[in-house]
Amino acid sequence: MNAANYLYISALLFTIGAVGVVVRRNAIVVFMCIELMLNAANLSFVTFSRINGNLHGQVFAFFTMVVAACEVVVGLAIIVTIYRSRRSASVDVASLLKR
Amino acid sequence: MVTSNALVYLIALPLFGSVVLLLAGRRADKWGHLLATALPAGSFVIGLTELLAMLGRSPQERSVTQKLFEWISVGNFKIDAGLLLDQLSICFVLLITGVGTLIHIYSISYMSHDPDRRRFFAFLNLFIAAMLLLVLGDSYLSLYVGWEGVGLASYLLIGFWNQKPTYATAAKKAFVMNRIGDMGLSIAIMIAFATLGTVSFAGVKEGAPQASTAALTAIGIMLLIAAIGKSAQFPLQAWLGDAMAGPTPVSALIHAATMVTAGVYLITRSNFIFDAAPTAQLLVVIVGAITLLFGALIGMAKDDIKKALAASTMSQIGYMILGTGLGPVGYAFAIMHLLTHGFFKAGMFLGAGSVMHGMDDEVNMRRYGGLRKFMPITFATFGLGYLAILGVPPFAGFYSKDHIIETAFNAGGIKGIIIGSVALLGAGITAFYMTRVMILTFTGAPRWDEKAHHPHEPSILMWLPMAILAIGSVSSGFLLSKGDALVNWLSPLFEYEGGHEVELLKPIVVTTLALAMVATGIAIAFIKYARGNVAQVAPVNVSVFTKIARRDLLQDDFNEAVFMRPGQGLTATLLKTDEVIIDGAVRGVARLAVGSGSLLRRTQTGFVRSYAALILIGALALIAAIWVVTF
């Protein structure tokens, strides 16, 4: 099977994630879309690892997972806190930075 | 070379007095003037002992030096602060301290009603100290320090009554015009150092024969500019008339003993430069000749007694400068005229002060008249000074001025005839305006309110100095020229080679001509003023020449039109340029930053999703750019 197909899937997943981040309001969904983009990148890493015949990409995929795990911990904690104080998980409600 | 440790005290005594009086403040009010008078007198005594010591040595070993300290030592630029007392400086030292002391004594009484008399005496002492440093320095750089000190002291004294804005302006005017001359002196020093590598008198004298004529001419012209500024010569003469704003003793000090004589000293001291630079020397002659006529013409039209005397000083210093421009033979005569002038001009200024003292500070001669009866001593001393300045034999001016006129005629060729005639004409005009001063002030019917004014003879402290100066006015010329005493005394300093000059006119002819001119001047003045028809107010319907002379020959109008107005225009333009271009650029940058900031602010919405979209667009743009560049 042609390795390029994996890259197409990766690009598709990344696009879905990016569009999701921009168009969705629910923080949880935005969060999941970010995860989707990270994993799209992971898929590309692994594919390139396969194409090039070395393990560099694999190693990077692990790094990405570690970072993603940390991000989930911090991010979910923030989302929960925001939900508690505002009774809403919409990202548009939390726009205090402008003021 | 003889050395002496006493020289520094000549300067240190008056300097000490000025420092003490300024620092002690009001506590010194009671005794300050006495200390300040005693210290220049002490310097005079030191000067006399030095003179006696010099007389005891052979002519070649008369100069005395004293090294004070190593002043500047940078690489091969080394200057020692040192003092030099030779045949030339001793003349000045005795004149400055002698006449200076007399003026101090006079001021004790003249300024007794002034609450700031102590400050006045502190400045007088500073003036004396600076002038002594000027004539005693052994290099152009030490001279420069004294030169600037004189400028400062004159500024402080001319503006002594600075509560009057016009007086403060006069002080500023004197200072600013002097600065132009000071620039000349500093440039001369720089050229001397660049071409000769030294600024000491001895070093420059030694190096001058090897230097190029161009460099020497440049130094000479710059020194001439310096002399023009300090000695109030054409075209920097305008400050002298306004300098009358100072108390009268200051005028006497500036005009007789210090300040204006500095230029004559500078040129005489630099004789080795001027003798080797004929162009510069010719300029000196021209400046002197123009000024002696200029001052005399102004003197004819002035009704203010002090301003008339000031114009006469300008004219007499013109004679001296003319003398210094006539080469080795002229220097000694210039110095002789300077010394005799020191006596009679100081005497006349003090006399004018005495008249003002008796007439409640009235200076307009048209409101004097008939004062001879009320002030016989002042009349006598002023009259002796008057005879001296006219050059009537056997008074002092006869010996000194006649020699200058004679030397001018013998300068050779058409130049000699022109400057000789100018000097002769100047003598005639001098006779006219000085006679006018005498007639208007002392003779005729009183033109003042006899109820308002009570003219009286001043106290002994004032008339004694006047009497001593009058004795000097009578005798100094005879004593100095007896057996060519002063010429021989000064001759070791100048490369004097007598005998080969062309004698255009015999001395007796020159004397006769000069006396004829003087007699004519006196006669015209008598015809015009002695019939007792002098108006109390200056007539308005006068010829255009009189009007111009009353306006100081338009010197201020000229300066204002040529220098002041364009200067103001230049400042206004520069100010506008600064506001529009430089400030405009700064403000423009600020406005640009503010404007672009408020534009960019719109992108900061606070919504997470818009930031995410911007990041996405940015990333896409980046990728697109990379793609475009790589393919």
Image: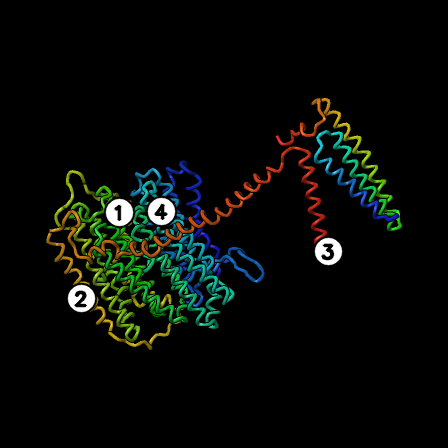
Q: Which mark is residue B157?
A: 4
Quarter holding residue B344: bottom left
Outermost front residue: A1
Q: Which mark is residue B516?
A: 2
Q: Secondary structure at mark 2?
A: helix
Q: Which mark is residue B353?
A: 1
Q: Nearer the viewer, residue B572 or B366?
A: B572
Label 4 with label 1: CB-CB less than 8 Å: no
Alpha-carbon distance for marks 4 and 1? 16 Å
Q: Amino acid at mark 2?
A: Ala
Alpha-carbon distance for marks 4 and 2? 40 Å
Q: Left or right: where does residue B35 sit relative to residue A85?
A: left
For label 1, the crowd category at 10 Å Cα-Cα, with few meaning under 14, some 14 to 19 and many 20 or more, is many
Reply above or below: B604 against B541.
above
Q: Amino acid at mark 3?
A: Phe
Mark 4 vs mark 2, foreground winner is 4
Alpha-carbon distance for marks 3 and 1? 100 Å
Q: Nearer the viewer, residue B381 or B265?
A: B265
Question: What is the x, y in percent for residue B75?
Answer: 58, 60
For label 4, the crowd category at 10 Å Cα-Cα, with few meaning under 14, some 14 to 19 and many 20 or more, is many
